[in-house]
Amino acid sequence: MYAGFGDSPASAARRADRRASGLVTALVVVLLALALLSWTTAGDEEPRPDASADGTGAVPDSDDKPGQDPSGWTGDGGRTGLSERFGQRERPSGHAALVDNPLYGTGRLSPRPCPVAEPDVDEAESMEAFLNSVADCLDDAWRTQFARAGLPFAPPERVFWEEPGVSPCRSYPSRAGAFYCRASASIYIGTSDVVEKWNGATRSVVYASLLAHEYGHHVQGESGLLEYYHEQRELREDPLERNSWTRRSELQANCLAGAFLGSVRVSYPLDDGDLAALLTDAAATADREDSPPEDRTHGSADNSVRWTRKGWEEQTPGACNTWDVPDESLVH
């Protein structure tokens, strides 16, 4: 007989066995519950965009100028299900998305109040605050326009960098100082880099135009246009044919930027000097006259100015249909 206090070794062992058995049972129940929860939430998760092996998605021709062919394209950029959730119609697809997009029939952008404080271009924090103010106005303006078209819309994410980083499309800083990545539906702008690349320009409209141009690519993506454009561009084996598609996309983004800026010129406010700076900048960021054909991706200076001014004056997406222009010289 066990002499002492408490359980005997045998009864203690049996109790320990029962405790161990209970722990195993509880653990199995917990694991089954977690597995069930994981399966349920995975079933509700929207599909994520796939990236290429090197994480860059579609590789642009170059990024030495703002507004390159939006890279990282992966279908709808991870936005599947928006139209179902919001009870709106599906985004258009195919050739109709280019030439007969519902967005073209939404009329003038509403002249929403958009008072913007002039930034101190030498201070990164001031530039970031300025860019966020303009982006807020862009969100409001295009959300309204998409609602008129009956199309789903989600504003882009913003990454206004001061330090180097990596997006699903490319690393930054980039030579352009700014880019749009469809894979993350995000606009990336270097708060100090763009000031340096624009030679310390003090008229804020040039930075607002850059942001509005990149936002124009997001508008293309949300309207269903970007997917078909990208597919057709990649089907072209001839680099010059691919460039002709890229130019139309870039000139359209110029026009969309002009339309937004024209719609807020009273409340911003923007004067004739700002318009002159805007158009001068449009010419400066166009293809150079002496550039070889394989590098012509943004349109001539004349056309860059023409489409920017057209947007400014008409202030409607319908004025920016670069895909249905009978005169090819207008998109060269």
Image (cartoon, rainbow, N blue to C red):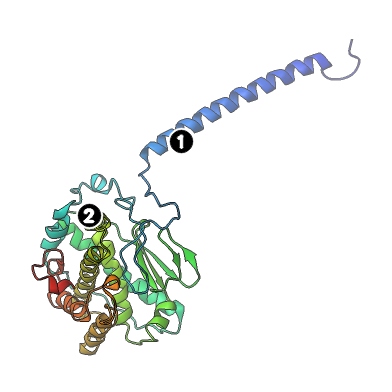
Alpha carbon distance from label 1 to label 2:
35 Å
- How packed is label 2: few (under 14 Cα within 10 Å), some, or many (20 or more)? some
- The residue singled out by tag 1 in the image is 38
Q: Estimate the x, y position of residue 254 in percent, counting from the top left.
A: 23, 73
- Farthest top residue? 1
The C terminus, quarter of image: bottom left
Residue position for label 2: 228
Quarter residue 264 falls in? bottom left
Total residue callouts:
2
Q: Secondary structure at mark 1?
A: helix
Q: Secondary structure at mark 2?
A: helix
Mark 1 against mark 2, which lies toward the viewer? 2
Asked if 288 appears above or below 138 in the picture, the reply is: below
Q: Position of residue 203 (x, y in %)?
A: 32, 86
Label 1: few (<14), some or many (≥20) within 10 Å? few
Q: Earlier in the sequence, mark 1 or mark 2?
A: 1
Using the image, determine if residue 262 lies above or below residue 9: below
Extreme residue toward the right, this view: 3
63 or 190: nearer the viewer: 63
Q: Are dots 1 and 2 in contact, CB under 8 Å?
A: no
At label 2, which amino acid type do we have?
Tyr
- The picture places residue 250, in percent across and down from the top left corner, at 25, 69
